[in-house]
Image (cartoon, grey):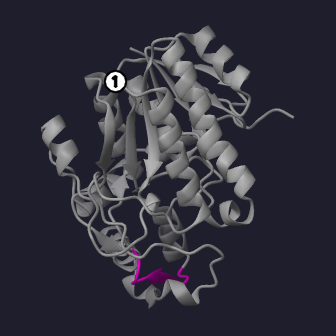
Amino acid sequence: MRILITGASGLLGSNLVLAASDAGHHVMATSRTRPVQLDGVEWREADLIDPEGAGALLAEMQPDGVIHCAAATDVDRCEDDPNWAFALNRDVARHIADSAREVGAALVHISTDAVFDGSPCPYAETDEARPINVYGESKLAGEQAVGEVHPQAAIIRVNFYGWSPPGRYSLAEWFLENLRQGKPRPGFTDIVISPLFVNQLAGLLLSVLEAGLSGIYHIASHDAISKYELGVRLAQAFELDSSLIHPANSERAGLRAARPKDLSLRVGKIERVLETRMPDTNVGIADLRRLEHAGYRERLEALLLEHAG
């Protein structure tokens, strides 16, 4: 399958490029910063905010499927600059969806658990989305835009962690880097998530695309844990000092944007459709360590070149 991956320099996009290439797909990738360097992968620098640019890109590449990962994900920056957030999370999503429909490509659009308000649930796909910050509002607007212009698209709500390209950190990496340096760090006990290891997520997204699914799905870990507990489990799995992770409350952290408290997701729908159980967090953490020992971080580092100029 000819697969176009947007946001290829990000945490999800970069790991997805490797996963799709390893699975034998013809991979095409876009990013605005660092070029992708991998045999068999076509890379294009693209400004997706320009609707004509998005249309020209897809018309040139003629993908069978698109996995749209590019997004504004800095929650506090979104709060400070709503125009930036909506331009990237709503308008670009619309441009990509419209262009994918025009060339007859299937679309998998990546959304977020942050479309919910965080009241204890956990959330199913049919529950009302009520975001409490600009990031969540802009991502929900992106879901709605995609649904309007490409009704056959699959919209996937996620929360994930994993090994990132150099210069970026997922939550798991932030914990691990500080633990390895012996630095104490807070872990929020009042924020609950269903985080999935990004390599597991990448494989499931390819399955969604290959199956031609449409509609909204939650793809997340089978269990839910607090950010504090995630830090502790990482420390234990990597044989580091878990006492360096101390319990903290997000409301006292001085964050500019409000954070939903409970974003645990129900995953029964995707489990039924794909006939597979979503992994538990401990399985993901074990895979995170296994891949580090296997040299996977070096593969990621080699994937992206520093942007010339």
* Left or right relative to 308: residue 23: left
User: From the viewer's perspective, is residue 26 above or below residue 252?
Assistant: above
Name which quarter of the figure residue 245 lies in.
bottom left
Q: Residues within 10 Å of mark 1 (few under 14, many from 20)?
A: few
User: From the viewer's perspective, is residue 158 above or below residue 8?
Assistant: below
* Left or right relative to 199: residue 98: right
Q: Where residue 129 sits: x, y (%)? A: 41, 58
Q: Quadrant of the N terminus?
A: top left
Q: Is residue 159 magenta?
A: no
What amino acid type should be assigned to the residue bearing mark 1?
Ala
Would residue 169 be seen by someone viewing this image from the given angle?
no
* Left or right relative to 309: residue 140: left
Name which quarter of the figure residue 117 lies in.
bottom left
Name which quarter of the figure residue 260 lies in.
bottom left
Residue named by callout 1: 23
Residue placed at 31% from the left, 48% from the top?
A: 219
Find the magenta span and give its range.
182-191
